[in-house]
Amino acid sequence: MDWQPQYNAAPSQMLPVVTASRNIELFKWGLIPGWADDPSVGNRMINARAETLAVKATFKKLLTTRRCIIPANGFYEWKKEGKHSLAYYMAQADGTPMAFAGLWDTWQGRAGVIHSFTIITTKSNAQMARIHDRMPAILLPEHYTQWLSLPMSLEPYPADTLTTRLITMKVNNPRYNSPDILDP
């Protein structure tokens, strides 16, 4: 797989995911359901709420057949402060990678075949709640195999294992992809 590290992963980019076959593949971020008429629907489906996966038609079947894991070193979130927003980076306090729970699908049309995914979100933990009310569903390492094999309850990640820091606003430009994006 020809892939370079992404310091500013953004929706519509090709990113690595791990599927039930345990292969790492590049899928487009923004779920394009197989039944969609137009792939642009993926622009609106970058996240899926854990609380409604089993009842929303778009996600119900995928929950039983197409779960995936999205590896990451951390994630970004923005906090509104008056008329402006501040960018924050959340990562494991010990620096180890994390894995988000996700769903994927395959779409085929005039544009060819596109494999795409959505990141599942949960309510925020106590630390994240100061910034935003949602966060990615982060899997504990002991749950990776279980998530790929069968649906499980997705809860907010333990707050005491994450670190949060204010970062540069360079993160607002999805074309900017350099390690210094994490600078304060």
Image (tube, rainbow, N blue to C red):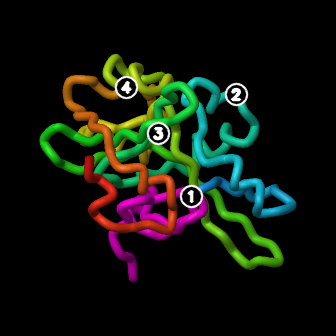
Q: Disc 4 or 3, which lies upstream in sequence?
A: 4
Furthest residue toward left: 94
Disc 4 vs disc 3: which is toward the camera?
A: 4
Disc 2 vs disc 3: which is toward the camera?
A: 2
Q: Which residue is mark 2?
A: 55
Q: Which residue is mark 1?
A: 29
The quarter of the displayed image where residue 28 is located: bottom right
Q: Amino acid at mark 2?
A: Val
In the image, what residue occupies the spot 60% across and 62% down? 12
Q: Can you give x and y, in whole percent of width and height, for residue 21 in the image?
A: 43, 62
In the image, what residue occupies the spot 45% across and 59% down? 9
Q: Can you give x and y, in whole percent of width and height, for residue 30 in the image?
A: 62, 55
Q: CA distance from mark 4 to mark 1?
A: 23 Å
Quadrant containing the N terminus in the rendered view: bottom left
- Determine crowd level at label 2: few under 14, some 14-19, many 20+ residues with C-alpha closer than 10 A: few
**In this orientation, which residue lies closer to the viewer: 31 or 80?**
80
Q: Is residue 162 placed above or below 40 in the rendered structure?
A: above
Q: CA distance from mark 2 to mark 1?
A: 22 Å
Q: Is residue 176 placed above or below 48 in the rendered structure?
A: below
Q: Amino acid at mark 4?
A: Met
Residue 150 numbered tag: 3
Say if the magenta span includes residue 22: yes
